[in-house]
Amino acid sequence: MKPSIGIKPADLAAVSEVLGKLLSDVFVLYTKTRNAHWNVEGPDFHAMHLFFESQYEQLDETMDEIAERIRSLGHYAPATLAAFLKLTSLTEATRSKNDSAGFIKELLEDHESTIIHMREHIDKIADEWHDAGTSDFLTGLMEEHEKMAWMLRSHLK
């Protein structure tokens, strides 16, 4: 049964599409953060291992929230690796070195790209597609990513 929440079906579909792409970006970012957690090397190994763990745990919660938001709008969340890779704007990276600074720079770029993607859609979702709830939801997620990016950026000073 489709939701009857005062938003046109076409608008629900458009918002769900934006959220599906965001979910895909966050899934790729989650995977890259897990990679950093598993493979970081160097004198700061223990601290960075724990730091990356805290970040991927937060991203795991974010993925669930995005998928549940898509479902609450009456659509299905992408949920396969093929779908995530098709929808994401992020790229997988190959590393020759597993140092924390390299992982941090790459993850920071991905967080900032994700923040920009969300910022570009917040007003459109509210104004054009009349979904203030998802607009507010994205604003909160954007703030979380901004904090995560700040934490990463602080390691590079």
Image (cartoon, rainbow, N blue to C red):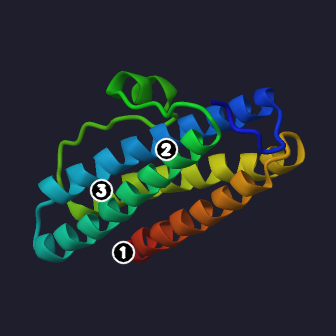
Residue 60 x/y as whole percent: 35, 55
The residue carrying pointer 1 sits among few (fewer than 14), some (14 to 19) or many (20 or more) residues within 10 Å by Cα, namely: few
Q: Are marks 3 and 1 in contact (CB under 8 Å)?
A: no
Which residue is tagged 3? Answer: 102
Which residue is tagged 2? Answer: 67
Q: Which residue is drawn at 21% across and 49% down?
A: 35
Q: Residue at x 20, y 72 (%)?
A: 50
Q: Nearer the viewer, residue 142 or 153?
A: 142
Relative vertical location of residue 76 with respect to residue 152 in this rendering, above or below:
above
Residue 52 x/y as whole percent: 27, 65
Work out how far the residue at label 1 is from the one at label 2, CA to CA, in angstroms.
31 Å
The residue carrying pointer 2 sits among few (fewer than 14), some (14 to 19) or many (20 or more) residues within 10 Å by Cα, namely: many
Residue 84 x/y as whole percent: 42, 30
Residue that sits furthest to the front in the current view? 1
Nearer the N terminus, badge 1 or badge 2? Answer: 2
Q: Which residue is drawn at 45% across and 57% down?
A: 62
Give the amino acid type for the residue marked by disc 3 in the picture: Gly
Q: Nearer the viewer, residue 12 or 109?
A: 12
Q: Do the residues labelled 1 and 2 touch (CB within 8 Å)?
A: no
Q: Residue at x 46, y 30 (%)?
A: 78
Q: Which of 35 and 14 is in front in this view?
A: 14
Quadrant in the picture for residue 8: top right
Q: What element carries label 2?
A: helix
Which residue is tagged 1? Answer: 155
Quarter holding the C terminus? bottom left
Give the amino acid type for the residue marked by disc 2 in the picture: Ala
Task: Say which of marks 2 and 3 sits in front.
Answer: 2
Nearer the N terminus, badge 3 or badge 1? Answer: 3
Residue 117 x/y as whole percent: 64, 46
Work out how far the residue at label 3 is from the one at label 1, CA to CA, in angstroms.
11 Å
Q: Is mark 1 on a helix, strand or loop?
A: loop
